[in-house]
Image (cartoon, coloured by chain):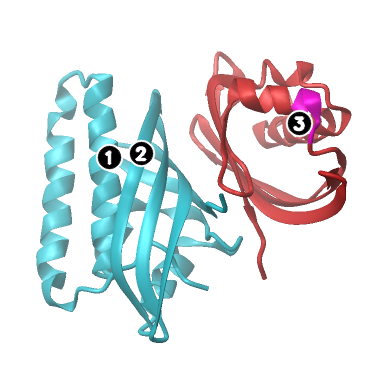
């Protein structure tokens, strides 16, 4: 199993935690005002980028801020994981993510629910062997207080 | 009034039956117009494309069995995760697929509507 959205960057762990915290502050500070739909869509996409950033640095603390404790996560091979299992899977030392890019994203808002569909390309190595795949993901975010958290994520390999 | 998870499971079973019958009529009120469906091979279908496919039943799904389903409610959002097994014939060749799906439903006007659905083959 190749856990997705994983990259390695040992050097900047503390910087990343601070960065994600600041991101949360920055995205939440305008909640006293009326947010427009484009504002919220941009906010969700920022959180998606933060997720990729946190994964590439294997930062469980940052990911815990983005992912609901009761997250439902389905890996590209059909494996069902809880948040704890997902966080544990990304710590595998044999996995060396090199590059993860969201090639496309689309956000749909339903009040306090946001659904993101997108395509992610991952270049990594597993046990020293390089691999590349593209997967289509569906993430569901819900607003909890001033923040959005992801409650469900599913990935499917693109076979065509 | 039945609990929401029972309503949602009933909706999911009706969905399976509609696919087997190739009759999407009952699904029209269940799917959001902006529904995005991600198929097991990563193809994306809009609501209209998905409904057309159910109607044509061009994958000739003879039997769909939901092996397990679990509903998790997050306020006005429900996430259904489950596994299924489907038998059919495609391009003259029989197939048997097993996959895991995640459906996202939103409570709107007292009704649950599906806004996103995705399936992933179980490879292990």
SS state under label 3: helix
x, y percent for residue B112? 61, 24
Q: Measuring 11% from the left and 50% from the top, which residue is drawn there?
A: A22
Q: Measuring 47% from the left and 71% from the top, which residue is drawn there?
A: A2
Residue A72 visible in the current orientation: yes
Q: Is residue B78 above or below residue A151?
A: above
Front-most of residues A125 and B108: A125
Front-most of residues B120 and B12: B120
Q: Residues within 10 Å of mark 3 (few under 14, many from 20)?
A: some
CA separation, marks 3 and 2? Answer: 27 Å
**Residue A105: image tag:** 2
Mark 3 = which residue? Answer: B15
The letter of the cyan chain is A
Q: Is residue B26 above or below residue B106?
A: above
x, y percent for residue A19? 12, 56
Determine if the magenta segment contains residue B56.
yes
Q: Read off the magenta span.
A: B54-58
Q: Is residue A106 above or below residue B100?
A: above
Check whether the beta carbons of the residues at disc 2 and disc 1 lie within 8 A of each other.
Answer: yes
Marks 2 and 1, the one that precedes in the sequence:
1
CA separation, marks 2 and 1? Answer: 8 Å
The letter of the red chain is B
Could you say which quadrant of the image residue A106 lies in?
Answer: top left
| Residue reaching furthest to the front | B91
CA separation, marks 3 and 1? Answer: 31 Å
């Amino acid at each position: 199993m190749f856990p997705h959205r994983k990259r390695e960057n040992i050097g900047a762990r503390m910087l990343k935690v601070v960065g994600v915290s600041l991101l949360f502050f920055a995205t939440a500070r305008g909640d006293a005002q009326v947010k427009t739909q484009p504002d919220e869509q941009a906010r969700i996409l920022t959180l998606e980028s933060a997720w990729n950033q946190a994964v590439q640095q294997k930062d469980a603390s940052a990911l815990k801020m983005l992912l609901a404790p009761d997250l439902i996560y389905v890996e590209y091979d059909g494996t069902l994981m809880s948040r704890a299992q997902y966080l544990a899977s990304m710590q595998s030392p044999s996995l060396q993510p090199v590059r993860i890019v969201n090639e496309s994203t689309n956000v749909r808002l339903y009040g306090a629910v946001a659904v993101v569909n997108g395509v992610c390309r991952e270049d990594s190595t597993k046990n020293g062997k390089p691999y590349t795949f593209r997967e289509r993901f569906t993430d569901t975010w819900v607003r909890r207080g001033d923040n959005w958290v992801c409650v469900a994520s599913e990935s499917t390999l693109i076979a065509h | 009034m039945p609990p929401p998870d029972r309503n949602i499971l009933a909706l999911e079973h009706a969905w399976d039956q509609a696919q087997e019958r190739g009759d999407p009529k009952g699904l029209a009120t269940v799917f959001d117009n902006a529904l995005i469906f991600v198929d097991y091979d990563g193809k994306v279908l809009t609501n209209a494309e998905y409904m057309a496919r159910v109607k044509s039943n061009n994958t000739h799904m003879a039997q769909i069995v939901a092996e397990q389903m679990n509903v998790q409610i997050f306020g006005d959002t429900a996430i259904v995760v489950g596994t299924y097994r489907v038998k059919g014939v495609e391009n003259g060749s029989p197939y048997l697929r097993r996959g895991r799906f995640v459906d996202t439903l939103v409570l709107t006007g007292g009704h649950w509507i599906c806004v996103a659905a995705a399936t992933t083959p179980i490879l292990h």
